[in-house]
Image: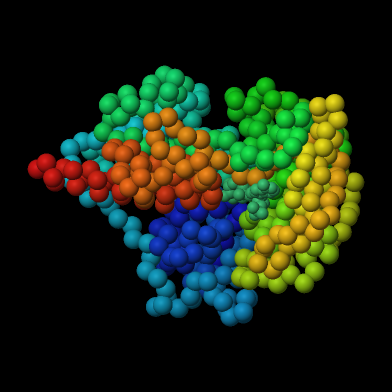
């Protein structure tokens, strides 16, 4: 039985390079790589050697015969991407080996044709650690990582949900990278407070900014200053023991929580807020959050999207993970009427949603209910506290365009969480694109208009915006370091 990629897939493509028969796709050099929600193993080509299992940093690949009930759906998900009968004759990754795009090459880097380089990396999250790993493949490069917090690894520690233990295991890989003798991590060291960017630039040959997108995209509607309204990312920080959010208070005694937005962050918070307290107690969840969940009054977490099910921002692996958890999910079948899929991932997502809808309402535990076509208009308040949300109803066209119908609906809730995405913050001394929340760059070179800022590079969410998975940062960092290398070698040859 072939191996199968499951929910925790981080997309860093380590498995692709390990596979001797090129059966894992998309590879980083294939067009779908940037948009795929996970990687897939071709069951007809897999030789069951297990090389991918060893390479995967998050334990996401399982031999078919060891698939648990929780993961059995991924057998079909992997296979569907290679089967022309699954979706309109579409085969995402051609089965004929002769026609396949070449395997992403594994290269041993040639030594840097430049004097030894000492690099500063700001931040220690996934993009920073993948970048450090890539720099350290070059024997004459050393790296110092500057981290503001007392513990490293950024969103891998403070952003991944506590019950996603496989995904959190990526920190073992980062621990290994951190042990490299030419890498130093300085904790509790904040740029602008303990050392300035100019000082970093003076002391190092190059500075790589990997500070991520640390704030939330703002929800610009009335009422967001009321008690009981918060960003979902603050709640995530709170239940993950992030020091910036430890003092926050969230009232989980309310009947209903509304989550605005339906990306993977929305699914994470809905799952944790309705999760079994005993099971959560076996995870890394903060004690404060666990106590609050043990005493919760929540009967429903309503996950609300302004567009339709076909435009849902959550990914298929996360939806399957939710379906396979103990969560009691409710979808109104009427929301799915007449919807047609545009590609295989779409089709598989709609199948999952239809299966949920067919189950109807059962049990008496807290439920996660999906609602579609509702745009938040105002946070309703009384005496400075949240009492609900007024939504404008949208008509959603097949292409995803939402048009207000003119009707509104008020829904009661004691806690409202906005999960509408992250946003980068400006770095003093560097250019900033306020709209996108990124530092303008050309393949990782920081750009001031048309001019590169000498010796300063970016990677991760502050480079490309808050999209993708942990492993997406690997290819992103590899691209930036290729730019840095080209610049350093060009400068060295110009002065030779
Ligand atoms: P996201 O995926 O960008 O989803 C944002 C959601 O907010 C969308 O439903 C969007 O709807 C909605 N939205 C945006 N502006 C809105 C507004 N003004 N009013 C109402 N709704 C609005 O954001 P995210 O969930 O924060 O995730 C960020 C990234 O982290 C994603 O790449 C995600 O996959 C990743 N992540 C991954 C995992 C995982 O793999 N387990 C976990 C967490 C996060 P529209 O489409 O209509 O704009």
At x 78%, y 65%, the residue is 336
Query: Residue farthest to the left?
Result: 496
266 up-or-down from 29: above or below: above
Q: Which quadrant of the rendered structure holds the C terminus?
A: top left
326 left or right of 18 in image:
right
State whether residue 212 appears in this view: yes
Q: Quadrant of residue 259?
A: top right
Residue reaching furthest top?
A: 194
Residue plotted at (37% across, 62% down): 104
Looking at this view, name the residue that lies furthest to the front: 406
The residue nearer to you, when weighing 476 against 385, is: 385
Across and down, in percent, residue 153 comes to 49, 34
Residue 328 in sight = no
- Residue 134 spot, x, y in % from top left: 35, 44
Q: Position of residue 197 (x, y in %)?
A: 36, 27
Indicate left or right for 373 with 43 as reference: right
Residue occupying the point 48% across, 51% down: 472
Depth check: give the residue in front, 223 or 203.
223
């Amino acid at each position: 039985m072939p191996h199968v990629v499951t929910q925790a897939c981080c997309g860093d493509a380590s498995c692709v390079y390990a596979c001797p028969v090129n059966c894992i796709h998309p590879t980083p050099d294939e067009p779908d790589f940037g948009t795929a929600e996970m990687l897939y193993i071709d069951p007809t080509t897999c030789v069951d050697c297990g090389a991918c299992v060893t390479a995967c940093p998050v334990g996401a690949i399982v031999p078919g015969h060891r698939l648990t009930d929780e993961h059995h759906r991924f057998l079909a998900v992997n296979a569907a991407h290679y089967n022309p009968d699954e979706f309109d004759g579409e085969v995402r990754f051609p089965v004929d080996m002769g026609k396949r795009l070449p395997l992403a090459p594994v290269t041993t880097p040639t030594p840097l044709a430049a004097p030894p380089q000492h690099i500063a990396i700001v931040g220690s999250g996934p993009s920073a650690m993948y970048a450090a790993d890539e720099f350290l493949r070059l024997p004459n490069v050393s790296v110092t990582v500057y981290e503001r917090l007392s513990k490293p690894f950024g969103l891998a520690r403070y952003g991944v949900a506590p019950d996603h233990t496989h995904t959190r295991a990526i920190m073992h890989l980062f621990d290994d990278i951190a042990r490299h003798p030419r890498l130093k991590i300085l904790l509790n060291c904040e740029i602008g407070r303990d050392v300035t960017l100019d000082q970093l630039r003076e002391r190092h040959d190059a500075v790589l900014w990997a500070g991520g997108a640390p704030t939330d995209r703002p929800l610009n509607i009335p009422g967001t200053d009321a008690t009981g309204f918060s960003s979902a990312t603050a709640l995530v920080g709170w239940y993950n023991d992030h020091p910036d959010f430890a003092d926050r208070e969230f009232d989980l005694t309310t009947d209903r929580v509304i989550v605005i937005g339906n990306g993977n962050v929305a699914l994470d918070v809905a799952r944790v807020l309705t999760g079994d307290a005993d099971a959560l107690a076996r995870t890394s969840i903060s004690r404060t959050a666990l106590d609050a969940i043990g005493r919760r009054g929540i009967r429903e977490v309503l996950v609300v999207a302004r567009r339709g099910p076909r435009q849902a921002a959550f990914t298929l692996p996360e939806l399957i993970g939710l379906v396979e958890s103990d969560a009691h999910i409710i979808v109104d079948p009427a929301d799915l009427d007449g919807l047609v899929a545009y590609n295989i991932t779409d089709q598989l997502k709609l199948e999952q949603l239809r299966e949920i809808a067919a189950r109807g309402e059962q049990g008496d535990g807290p439920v996660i209910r999906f609602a579609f076509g509702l745009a938040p208009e105002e946070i309703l308040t009384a005496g400075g506290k949240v009492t609900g949300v007024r939504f404008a109803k949208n008509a959603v066209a097949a292409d995803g365009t939402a048009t207000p119908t003119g009707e509104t609906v008020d829904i009661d809730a004691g806690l409202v969480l906005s999960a509408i995405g992250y946003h980068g913050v400006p770095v003093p001394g560097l250019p900033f694109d306020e709209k996108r929340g990124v530092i303008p760059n050309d393949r990782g070179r920081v750009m001031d208009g048309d001019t590169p800022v000498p010796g300063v590079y970016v990677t991760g969410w502050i480079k490309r915006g808050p999209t993708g998975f942990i492993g997406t940062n690997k290819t992103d960092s590899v691209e930036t370091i290729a730019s840095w290398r080209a610049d350093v070698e060009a400068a060295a040859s110009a002065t030779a």
